[in-house]
Amino acid sequence: MHTVPLPNTTLSVSRLCLGTGVFGARIKGDNATRVVEEYLRLGGNFIDTAHCYAFWEPDGEAGCSERELGRIIHELGIREQIVLATKGAHPDGGPKYPRPDRYMSPEVIAQDITESLQRLQIETIDLYYLHRDDSRVPVDEIISVLNEHVRAGHIRYLGASNWRTERIEQANRYASTQGLQGLVISQVQWSLAVPNWQMGEDPTVRYVTPEDAGWYAAHNIPVAAYTSTAQGYFAGTEKGEQSFGNNPLNAARRERARHLAQQLGVTPTQIALAWLLHQKPLTIPIFMTGNLEHLRECMSAAEASLTPEQVRWLSEGD
């Protein structure tokens, strides 16, 4: 798998990113180590985690993903081989992840960064996302605070997760006028299937709309697409059906993905990932698995070549 340069950075990342949302909980120990080893063997180098992962899991807690990943990085000696991304500034998650109302205050961001560095056993985070947004906080304050951590050597580059494009544009306009580092990437939900929840139900989470995609392409900002396989919807998993099923648009897209997969000798999941890989802007699907065969299936999606007409047909039909 080849790598691609991230615009406005010195980083080059693999076309697919390994997500570690349930590392330390459902995926841990030797299983987690094998997943990372196989991902690297197949040419991957981009790994994603977060300060809050995986507090929602029955046997998980906030920080267990970062700690598990830190253990693996240290034991395998792979720090220089990977581009490591984590996220902070997440709102309250209930009893298992209590947070202050001002979760994007300078003090909370500083504490999140410090704890992430300690858990990951590293000195510098390659790519640091703000996990959610808080419109009560002006973007100039956010950019100024984050740049203090860049100057201190805690962070190399900055990203936003679940931010509206308007806020990203405001933040980057301010950064440009002040000679500061802006937001170089956006992590947001995107897949061939559209989620059943409506945008705005939770103002701190988003998925990519066609208008968003156009904006990202025009501004040369790549997208790290989470839930890229629609929780297994294209493979017919129960979890995928719960989140993306009973939706005529998705059903039609899945049928087209299955048809094209049969033609090309690949799986519908690989078609869904390939669809993302052929998008403009530059899109890097994030996937997560504890199964080595599924890992290989996802990584092989980078080899699937789709024509522009096939890309359009998958989402729009005839």
Image: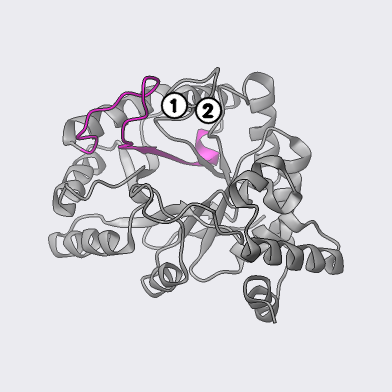
Mark 1 vs 2: CB contact within 8 A: yes
Which residue bears the numbered disc 2? Answer: 69
Residue nearest the observer in this picture, 168 or 144? 168
Which residue bears the numbered disc 1? Answer: 120
Amino acid type, label 1: Leu
Examine the rendering and report whether any part of residue 5 can be seen: yes
In the image, is residue 173 part of the stretch drawn in magenta?
A: no
Q: Quadrant of the C terminus?
A: bottom right
Tell me the element at label 1. helix
Expressed as whole percent of the image width and height from the top left, the position of residue 231 reads: 63, 45
Q: Is residue 244 above or below residue 211?
A: above
Magenta-highlighted residues: 79-104
Residue sitting at 65 percent across and 46 percent down? 240
Amino acid type, label 2: Leu
Q: Quadrant of residue 312?
A: bottom right
Residue nearest the observer in this picture, 12 or 139? 139
